[in-house]
Amino acid sequence: LESMMHGVPVIAYAAAAVPETMDGAGVLVREKRWPEIAEMIGALARHGPLREAVLRAQDARVERYFARNVKEELRHLISPLLD
């Protein structure tokens, strides 16, 4: 999320909570195919439609992240424990 906030295109390996954190933004890598990853890095480093689309999706993800009502989410998650 920090890279997204600073306008850096993100490529990340789809493990643990990474897919949920990215929430459809950036580029998720499911297999470690290094030549393809290198090509994607090159494509995202150049200004063009792919980079702009990724950055727009990342901006939207950051907006969704900060729009969350964390207090209400936490209350919902712990409410079964409080009954």
Image: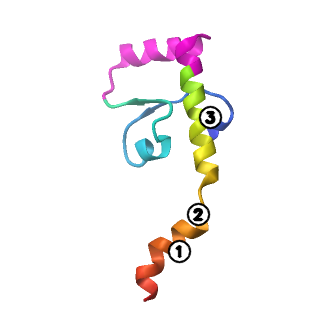
The answer for how far apart the CA atoms under marks 2 and 3 are is: 19 Å
Q: Can residue 1 be spotted in the picture?
A: no
The answer for how far apart the CA atoms under marks 2 and 1 are is: 8 Å
Secondary structure beneath dot 1 equals helix
Classified by dominant secondary structure, the portion drawn in magenta counts as: helix
Looking at this view, is 9 or 78 the one in front? Answer: 78
First along the sequence among labels 2 and 3 = 3
Tell me the kind of residue under disc 2.
Val
Please give the range of residues in magenta. Answer: 31-52
Residue 32, placed above or below residue 78: above
Residue found farthest to the right:
6
Q: Name the residue at 46% across, 16% down.
A: 40
Q: Which residue is mark 3?
A: 59
Query: Horizontally, is 2 left or right of 41 in the view?
Result: right
The picture places residue 37, in percent across and down from the top left corner, at 41, 19
First along the sequence among labels 2 and 1 = 2
Q: Is residue 46 magenta?
A: yes
The picture places residue 34, in percent across and down from the top left corner, at 37, 18
Please say which color scheme the image uses: rainbow
Residue 41, placed above or below residue 80: above
Q: Which residue is mark 1?
A: 75
Q: Which residue is mark 2?
A: 70
Tell me the kind of residue under disc 3.
Asp
The picture places residue 20, in percent across and down from the top left corner, at 43, 46
Looking at this view, is 69 or 9 the one in front? Answer: 69
